[in-house]
Image (spheres, rainbow, N blue to C red):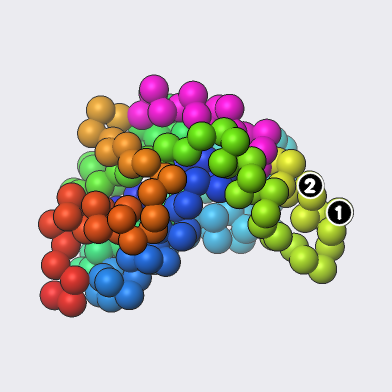
Amino acid sequence: MIVWVNGAFGSGKSTLVDELIPRWPEALVYDPEMVGFVLRKIVDVPTGDFQDLRLWRRQVVDLAVGLVEEYRRPVLVPMTLVNPGYVEEVFGALKDAGIAVHHFFLKVSEDVLVKRIDGRSFTPDDPAQDEQVRGWCRSKIESCMAAADTLPSDTVFLDGELSPRELADDVLARVGAVPGR
């Protein structure tokens, strides 16, 4: 199975996955952003968003399917994916491959998202780049929040302002995970 943890930048996707890892040690963590970083080194990304590359979406699916098939373990995916066409493409391809997808979306107020983004450092050795990344993340808040209305009907919406422990308890219960087994 795949447990896709979605939400705006700063919503707590990685924090939730970090809370799940020790409680569900058999789960693998797959961050599709790494696929984007690799592609950026190889090809031009005209829009600046590697999700706009068809190859990124294909590779995300292929690697996710490969991880599930080869290792027969649950896969945790912390990744913002809100473009309705891309959501349909990626989740549809995963389901077509016979992979169960549990999709969670962390809902967080705009004020909290801004505070969390502004409190993060992405590239501490390059303050100008750091601010550029924070600005990009802030610029995506509105579209990420609006996307909640366009996500698949089986999406589970979680209150991203709850503690990571509470969120992990909820996710584990909803996916039927028995930690340690």
Residue occupying image coordinates x 36% and y 29%: 151
Q: Nearer the viewer, residue 132 or 22?
A: 22
Please provide percent x and percent y for residue 108: 47, 38
- Magenta-colored stretch includes residue 143: yes
The amino acid type, in three-letter code, at marker 2 is Gln
Residue occupying image coordinates x 32% and y 53%: 167
The amino acid type, in three-letter code, at marker 1 is Ala
| Residue at the disc numbered 2 | 132
* C-alpha separation, residue under disc 2 versus residue under disc 1: 6 Å
Q: Hey, which quadrant is residue 88 in on the image?
A: top left
Return the mark for residue 128: 1
Q: How many marks?
A: 2
- Magenta-colored stretch includes residue 99: no
Residue occupying image coordinates x 78% and y 47%: 132
Left or right: 89 with respect to 44?
A: left
Please provide percent x and percent y for residue 73: 23, 68
Q: Are marks 2 and 1 in contact (CB under 8 Å)?
A: yes
Q: Kindly tell me whether residue 91 is visible in this rendering.
A: no
Q: Please, is residue 111 above or below residue 123 in the view?
A: above
How crowded pointer 2 is (Cα within 10 Å; few <14, some 14-19, many 20+) is rated as some
Q: Which residues are magenta?
A: 137-151
